[in-house]
Image: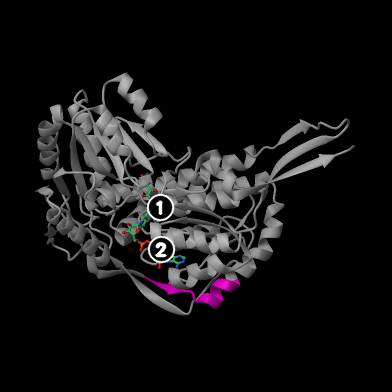
Amino acid sequence: MNQNYINGRFVEGATARDNINPSDTSEVVGVYTQANAEQTREAIDVADKASIGWAQSTPQQRFDVLDTIGTELLARKAELGELLAREEGKTLPEGIGETARAGQIFKFFAGEALRLSGDKLASVRPGVEIEVVREALGVIGIITPWNFPIAIPAWKIAPAICYGNAVVFKPADLVPGCGWALADIISRSGLPEGVFNLVMGRGSVVGEEILTNPKVKGVTFTGSVATGQHVAATCAGRMAKFQLEMGGKNPLIVLDDANLDIAVETAVQGAFFSTGQRCTASSRLIVTEGVHDQFVAAVIKRLESLKVDNALSDGVHIGPVVDESQLAQDMDYIRIGQEEGAKLAFGGERLERATKGFYLSPALFTETNNSMRINREEIFGPVASIIRVSDYDEALSIANDTEFGLSSGICTTSLKYASDFKRNAKAGMAMVNLPTAGVDYHVPFGGSKGSSYGSREQGSYAAEFFTTVKTAYILP
Ligand SMILES: NC(=O)C1=CN([C@@H]2O[C@H](COP(=O)(O)OP(=O)(O)OC[C@H]3O[C@@H](n4cnc5c(N)ncnc54)[C@H](OP(=O)(O)O)[C@@H]3O)[C@@H](O)[C@H]2O)C=CC1
Ligand SMILES: O=C(O)CCC(=O)C(=O)O
């Protein structure tokens, strides 16, 4: 059994669960222990003690630890990418790519540990000097979702350690394997015991303890809007710092002047790859009428060429949905869309394959409008809608008419529209001739409106959340 990692030791939890392969539900990927609230408290106590020493560690110590973790992740990307594909259902190339991204993130933050700087200013009072420095927060609680089981933990754990904090990490209960593999790698990295702790288990048990324990000074969360709101209310209630990354209903505008091949590939990748299970997925394809019919026909042709099957099979483009309940949610929305009057132009069917899994053909709705539930609520599956518009102005207005604001995109060859879109898209990320999903690892990631709360993740902007600022006045 794979155990929790607390105070530098692997320890059994209160219960255990089987980790099931969504491509083949007869396969148990592994058995993983689950912590109860008491064991979570123990991990938080240990982290609290260890945080004092780690906050004093040198940039070189932090660099060495983070670089070592990154090196092992990159060296084992094929093996860990396969584990990821087996437990989450991403295709093998996607799993390997995500693992490599996790390795690069640790390497990036290794470098950041050496670059942490402050400010020195003259005071308005004669002879006084001022220093502004960033200090660690203490214990950071990390709560992650199932859809990026190694990259999202990496982009929260690496900066937490980089800026001198201790960590209590709870991976999503559906995908403990990648979280455990990260703990295993971290256990060999030279990080002092207690600085990093893994507590696998349910959000309602382990997660709740992390949210409510006064020793946890900051919580970084990615997941659903409902849970995010609960994280916010609980943390604000006890004045802990928190950062949320939640859903998206990301628009991709396709203008008449777009390069059609680029637009089709951008839309299909952004909407359907990784089984559409990305908060950055292009779920609303907003298309001007001059190119609408041609674009729809070309997207359908491309969808016909995609292979949906076991995530580990050769040549697969789309793996299974992550589990039964997410599949039920996807199918519900496919029914709702039809009841709302949208035309199901392609897919949306449960598929049988050689292995028993949660396979769904990519679903494309046409003849939709932006008030339909399928265009307002996050579905989180391989389902996208086309919204027909008359011109760029209408397209932009519909793109921005959403509660969310994570990512957005436009396909156009017009510099004028591309520039206008970058300025006026109400989202944290704006892509031109690129999918709304699939971001770089060294620049800020996050959104506006209902998608995100708090400061940005990733890149050097991550320092904002994982540190607190101290201003020191000195009269030498
Ligand atoms: N923005 C994004 O990237 C994601 C969005 N989603 C959206 O959310 C929907 C549901 O997915 P789901 O996995 O249930 O999302 P959740 O928000 O429930 O899960 C995200 C994480 O929060 C944990 N959690 C759940 N309840 C609590 C709690 N009370 N206190 C602290 N932590 C808690 C979960 O634990 P555990 O699951 O282990 O019990 C998991 O680790 C999806 O269909 C999708 O629409 C989902 C994943 C990612
Ligand atoms: O699109 C990406 O690269 C990241 C997406 C993501 O973080 C998410 O879906 O939670």
Q: Is 279 or 292 nearer to us in this picture? A: 292
Q: Secondary structure at mark 2?
A: loop
Per the model, the C-alpha gap separating discs 1 and 2 is 14 Å
Q: Is 76 or 426 nearer to us in this picture? A: 426
Along the polypeptide, which appears first: circle 1 or circle 2?
Answer: 2
Q: Secondary structure at mark 1?
A: loop
The C terminus, quarter of image: top right
Decide: is 455 above or below 25: above
Residue 86 drawn at (x, y percent): 30, 60
Q: Residues within 10 Å of mark 1 (few under 14, many from 20)?
A: many
The N terminus, quarter of image: bottom left
Q: Residues within 10 Å of mark 2 (few under 14, many from 20)?
A: many
> Magenta segment, which residues?
31-42
Image quarter of residue 311: bottom left
Mark 2 vs ligand 1: CB under 8 Å?
A: yes
Disc number placed over residue 246 in the picture, else none? 1
Under mark 1, the amino acid is Met
Whether residues under marks 1 and 2 lie with C-beta atoms below 8 angstroms apart, the answer is no
How many marks the image carries: the answer is 2
Asked if the magenta segment contains residue 34, the reply would be yes
* Residue 285 at least partly seen: yes
Decide: is 473 above or below 37: above
Colouring method of the image = one colour
Under mark 2, the amino acid is Ala
Mark 1 vs ligand 1: CB under 8 Å?
A: yes
